[in-house]
Amino acid sequence: MQTEPIYLKLSHQILEQFSDVPVNRPLPSEHDLGEIFGVNRQTIRAALEELERRWLVRRVKGSGTFRTQRYEYRISRDLAPSFTQTVREAGADPRTRNGKPVVRPATEGERDILGLELGAKVTVLERVRFLDELPVSTAVSILPSALVPRLASVLTEDGSLDGILRRHYGYAPHRQWSQSRLSSPPSDIAATLGLRGQPPQILLRGLISCTLTGHKLEYVESYLRPDVFDVVTELRA
């Protein structure tokens, strides 16, 4: 029978022994872990890399290694297409930083998705989402400018786009379709999320429509950190 590699056995031991360490407090250093378990730093490093591959720890350069806390991110046609509301219902307290909305001509692909005519303009909104000051998600939303006039004047830096669409414009947003997969993010998004390199993240793509008018309101692409979120898709008859 093939024996389990030392670093795999050690990864289980580290996880078990330090399971009660708060997520915001680092585990002992590689040097200290080596002394605790009586192995060299190379073996400790391999064990921590294994835990990181399984999204059970997060290694932050200059700060240490931390246990992760993952939250369910539920996607369903019955649930509001709001990142903030979804994450709060999962037990976390997110914060959003909105960029300044930019108006430009729609591309051919955007016109196809949003059902726009040639020459139509779209409003582009980029956002970064945080949990405990850790960047955990980015999003780029493309909205028909004619449906959200003067969006830049009504959306605050930390305001909810879903809330603005409902309260200010009177829409009733819902998911028309959604798609998720693992994808390596562009280098700028990887840097925004504080990643080492460009490891695959959860890429969510979706189309938001209004149940009242039938208008296609928003095409959105979001990257979510898989060490923070566990995406759960619900299909109901």
Image: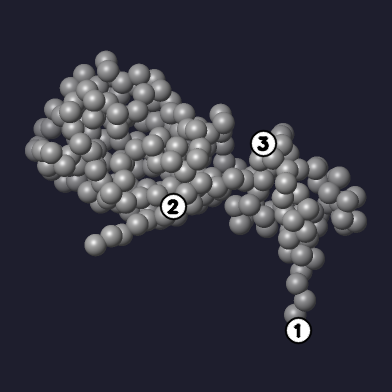
Measuring from the top left, give residue 237's x and y in whole percent: 24, 62
- Disc 1 marks a residue whose amino acid type is Met
Q: Are marks 3 and 2 in contact (CB under 8 Å)?
A: no
Reply above or below: 98 against 48. above
Task: Report how far apart the C-alphas of labels 2 and 1 lie in the structure.
Answer: 36 Å
Q: Amino acid at mark 3?
A: Asn
Mark 2, residue position: 231
Mark found first going from the N terminus, 2 or 1: 1
Give the alpha-carbon distance from disc 1 to disc 3, as whole Å.
Answer: 40 Å
- Of 130 and 101, nearer the camera is 130
Give the residue number, with chain letter if any, for mark 1. Answer: 1
Query: Can I make out residue 90 in this image?
Result: yes
Residue type (three-letter) at the residue carrying disc 2: Val
Q: Secondary structure at mark 1?
A: loop
Measuring 51% from the left and 46% from the top, which residue is drawn there?
A: 71
Q: Earlier in the sequence, mark 1 or mark 3?
A: 1
| Scheme of colours in the image | one colour
Q: Is residue 228 left or right of residue 24?
A: left
Label of residue 24 in the image:
3
Quarter of the picture holding the N terminus: bottom right
Q: Position of residue 165 (x, y in %)?
A: 24, 29
From the top left corner, tell me how far across and down residue 169 is, in percent: 19, 26
Question: Within 10 Å of the Cα at label 1, are there few (<14), some (14-19), or many (20+) other Cα atoms?
Answer: few
Q: Residue furthest top?
A: 153
Mark 2 secondary-structure assignment: strand
Q: Residues within 10 Å of mark 3 (few under 14, many from 20)?
A: few
Is 70 on the left-hand or right-hand side of 43? left
